[in-house]
Image: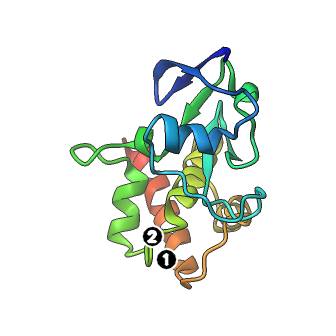
Amino acid sequence: MPQIRLWLNGFETSVDADPNRSLLDILRNELGLIGPHFGCGGGECGACNVIVDDRAVASCDMPLWSAAGKNITTLEGLGSEARPHPLQQAFIAEQAMQCGYCISGILISAAALLGQNPSPTSDEVKAALDRNLCRCGSHNRIVRAVLRAARQMAAG
């Protein structure tokens, strides 16, 4: 198997695996990262989203070879229990989580948005999260949480 090198949550990582396996499979089953979830398997639901370089992408249909040399951020790379990311703090404050299955993908999509646009409008947040499916009905609280995090990040 070829060695695939990538930057994972800020650290250079090397994976010895079939380059055609999905990035999601490698993240969860080889590297033990459980933030990205398997949802639809077709890149449609957002549960498996990770940040690749600066944009949110579905890792379930991304072959490992296409991640070579790229910067990958998973939920585990956003923040920690001791130092949560402002998005994680805002989601807790706004009670924007229900079952939790889709939340890691939503947090990743929101982090990618805020990385590109630190002061989004409500409509821009909704557009950025449009590909993240959630059945719990907490959409309004999710949008409020992203806007709250943007304000908190802007304030320093």
Residue 25 is marked as: none
State the residue position of label 1. 141
Judged from the image, the secondary structure of the residue bearing numbered disc 1 is helix
The residue depicted at 69 percent of the width and 41 percent of the height is 22
Q: Quadrant of the C terminus?
A: top left
Residue 10 drawn at (x, y percent): 46, 24
Give the left or right position of residue 87, taking residue 131 as reference: left
Q: Residue at x 76, y 56 (%)?
A: 43
- Tell me where residue 96 appears, x and y as whole percent: 44, 73
Report x, y in % for residue 31: 47, 34
Q: Quadrant of the N terminus?
A: top right
Outermost left residue = 82
Rendered residue at 75%/36% (across/down): 63
Quarter-wise, where is residue 2 in the image? top right
Judged from the image, the secondary structure of the residue bearing numbered disc 2 is: loop
Q: As rendered, which of 105 and 119 lies closer to the eye?
A: 105
Determine the image quadrant of residue 92: bottom left
The residue sitting at 25% across, 48% down in the picture is 81
Q: Which mark is residue 100?
A: 2
Of mark 1 and mark 2, the one earlier in the sequence is 2
Q: How far across and down, in percent of the image, does residue 6 sit?
A: 59, 21
Amino acid type, callout 1? Arg
For the residues labelled 1 and 2, the Cα–Cα distance comes to 14 Å
Amino acid type for the residue under numbered disc 2: Gly
Q: Above or below — where is 128 with respect to 53?
A: below
